[in-house]
Amino acid sequence: MQMSDQIDRPTWRAGDVPVSARFDDPYYSLEDGLAETRHVFLAGNDLPTRLRPGFFVAELGFGTGLNLLALAECASSAGVSGVRYCGFEAYPLPREDLTRALAAFQTLSPWRDALLDVWNPDGFEAVVGPVEVRMIRGDARATLATWDGAADAWFLDGFAPARNPELWEAGLMAEVGRHTRPGGSFATYTAAGAVRRALAAAGFAVERRPGFGRKRHMSVGRLEG
Ligand SMILES: C[S@@+](CC[C@H](N)C(=O)[O-])C[C@H]1O[C@@H](n2cnc3c(N)ncnc32)[C@H](O)[C@@H]1O
């Protein structure tokens, strides 16, 4: 496969919301991306309450980095540093698209600028405010299996399961479970039955909660045992 096949060039909707040309789905909510992130991924994982130095967040689908920046803002407001984050991404955005996608989020600007300074679509490690960041490029079905880390909280943020089924496969959800610390959690905007069943089979006690905006439900869970 050519390198250009593995880069996503989005189209744009509602001004500056990127929409994947490959998956025909927006990277974040057309209504209010940051509010959705806070509701689904932060509150869904009981953050900032659980944050402490060394707390490890991992994410399937680094995308624009919006969720990472919201985590940095959350940790900063809570006065917690030394939080760790690892994002898995198969089709990284070029810097110019990342810049445009994040331009609207003024409150995130200190961390956004730090991210743009170090952004490398081939993968990178850097410090973004209170968060030690790593981005691993490649299909998560291959890269997660060989990852030597374990997360306290997962952001499961693939495109819609019907459009991006590979990022929600049962085998990959099993790897999420295997790479979760005891008592660790996940949160995702989807309440699709197949995803919930795969996460239950991976060892999570799965719970349905009210979703963001027009989405009736989302899912959260804690690793059992
Ligand atoms: C909804 S977007 C993520 C948005 C992101 N969390 C943010 O804060 O902007 C889904 C992401 O999953 C990535 N993705 C899709 N299939 C993948 C795969 N098999 N492995 C790794 N990443 C994948 C897409 O390229 C895209 O960036």
Image: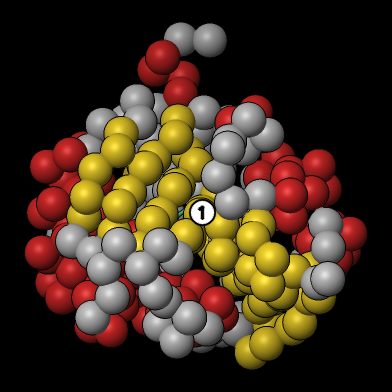
Q: Judge from the rendering whether residue 56 lies leftward or rightward of residue 214; answer left or right.
A: left
Along the line of sight, which residue is nearer the eye, 201 or 102?
Answer: 201
| Residue at x-position 55% and y-position 66% | 153
Q: State the SS at label 1.
A: strand
Q: Judge from the rendering whether residue 48 lies leftward or rightward of residue 46; answer left or right.
A: left
| Residue at x-position 60% and y-position 84% | 211
Q: In which quarter of the image is the C terminus?
A: bottom right
The type of residue carrying mark 1 is: Glu
Q: In this view, does 188 lie above or below 132?
A: below
Asked where in the image residue 126 lies, by quadrant, the reply is top left
Counting from the top left corner in percent of width and height, residue 53 is at: 36, 68
Label 1 residue near ligand 1, CB within 8 Å: yes
Mark yes or no: residue 43 visible. yes
Mark yes or no: residue 168 visible. no
Visual colour scheme: secondary structure
Count all numbered tags in the image, as a single digit: 1
| Residue at x-position 44% and y-position 35% | 136
Counting from the top left corner in percent of width and height, residue 178 is at: 74, 49
Q: Judge from the rendering whether residue 2 lies leftward or rightward of residue 199; answer left or right.
A: left
- Pointer 1: residues within 10 angstroms few (<14), some, or many (20+)? many
Counting from the top left corner in percent of width and height, residue 49 is at: 45, 87
**Residue at numbered disc 1:** 59
Query: Which residue is most to the top?
Result: 2
Counting from the top left corner in percent of width and height, residue 181 is at: 64, 60
| Residue at x-position 28% and y-position 84% | 78
Q: Judge from the rendering whether residue 140 lies leftward or rightward of residue 128; answer left or right.
A: right
Q: Is residue 100 above or below residue 97?
A: below
Q: In this view, does 35 lie above or below 111?
A: below
Q: Is residue 118 above or below residue 142?
A: below
